[in-house]
Amino acid sequence: MMLVALTLLLLATPAVAQETPNTWYAERIISGDTPPIVEHLWSKGPKLRAETVIRGHPIVTLVNGERYMTLDKILNTGVSIQRSPDAIREDAERSRPFGNEGSILQEAGGEKVSIEKVGGRQCELYRLTNSEGRQEVCVSQDQARLPLQFKVWRRKSGKEATTRYLDWTSGLEIPDDFFEPDSSVKLEHVSHEDYLRRAGQEQIGPAPPFFRGLLHGTR
């Protein structure tokens, strides 16, 4: 009788809901005074995977823990760079490792100037103008503060670039090994100090770091 009662109690106990994983996906297009670039980005907590095609070569960026990796999927080669302590420390301060243009611009002194509509969605436009040029970002009005459009104009070169985010998705089930390089990739391992020493003299890896803040820190 006691066993039956215990069984009924367990059946009546509501199941604990699984926490939605802190994951994001976005597709974005960068255009302007350079050839258009299409990027696909995924994240899980502080982990990042980005795929970009440069001159016909699919370049994969992986940021995972202490390492920043850039891989060429055709040549199956790449570089694994030690991240700076500042960059690693900042992981805990972000809700995601990409798509933070709004908060970065505000911290730098950017001010809200208007309400705009991008892709049929209302967003808040922030602008920062200084000696280097002008930056504008339009972010969603919800708690996620997702960037929908980001514009940069450089005063020295006169060049402009616009980044449009075409899609945002969250709560994806992504395994941890999605943010790891395949075991067949030939990786060159470089310390952060060695990277800084060599970077001004040669290209290290198949492409420059596209997410410099995740390698060096933003401050």
Image: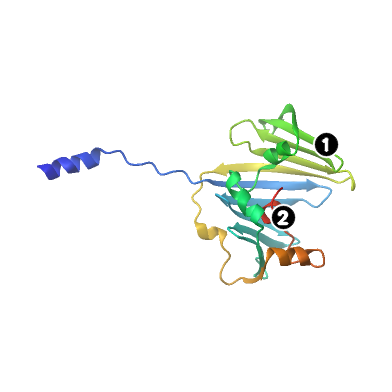
Residue 67 placement (x, y as % from top left): 62, 61
Instruction: Write the residue at 73% across / 31% down.
Output: 125
Question: Neighbour class for label 1 at 10 Å: few (<14), some, many (≥20)?
Answer: some
Report which quarter residue 59 is drawn in.
bottom right
Image location (x, y in percent) of residue 44: 54, 50
User: According to the image, what is the colour scheme of the structure?
Assistant: rainbow
Is 156 left or right of 26, judged from the image as shown? right
> Who's the residue at 74% across and 67% down the image?
204
Task: Indicate which label's residue lies in the foreground, 2 or 1.
Answer: 1
Q: Quadrant of residue 168?
A: top right
Q: Quadrant of the N terminus?
A: top left
Q: Amino acid at mark 1?
A: Thr
Which residue is drawn at the image coordinates 69% and 30% (left, top)?
124
Amino acid type at mark 2: Phe
Q: Which picture quadrant has residue 178?
A: bottom right
Q: Would you say the residues marked 2 and 1 are in contact, meaning their CB atoms lie under 8 Å apart?
A: no
Is residue 121 depicted above or below 81 in this figure?
Answer: above
Dot 2, how many residues are within 10 Å of its Cα: few (below 14), some (14-19), or many (20+)? Answer: few
| Residue drawn at point x = 49 percent, y = 46 percent | 21
Q: Is residue 119 visible?
A: no
Identify residue for label 1: 129
Q: Disc 2 marks which residue? A: 210
Outermost residue toward the top in this view: 114
Give the spatial CA distance, label 2 vs label 1: 23 Å
Residue toward you, 168 or 120: 168
Q: Where is residue 156 drawn, in percent x and y?
A: 90, 47
Left/right placement of residue 81 relative to residue 184 reads: right
Describe the element under mark 1 as helix, strand or loop: strand
| Circle on res. 145 | none
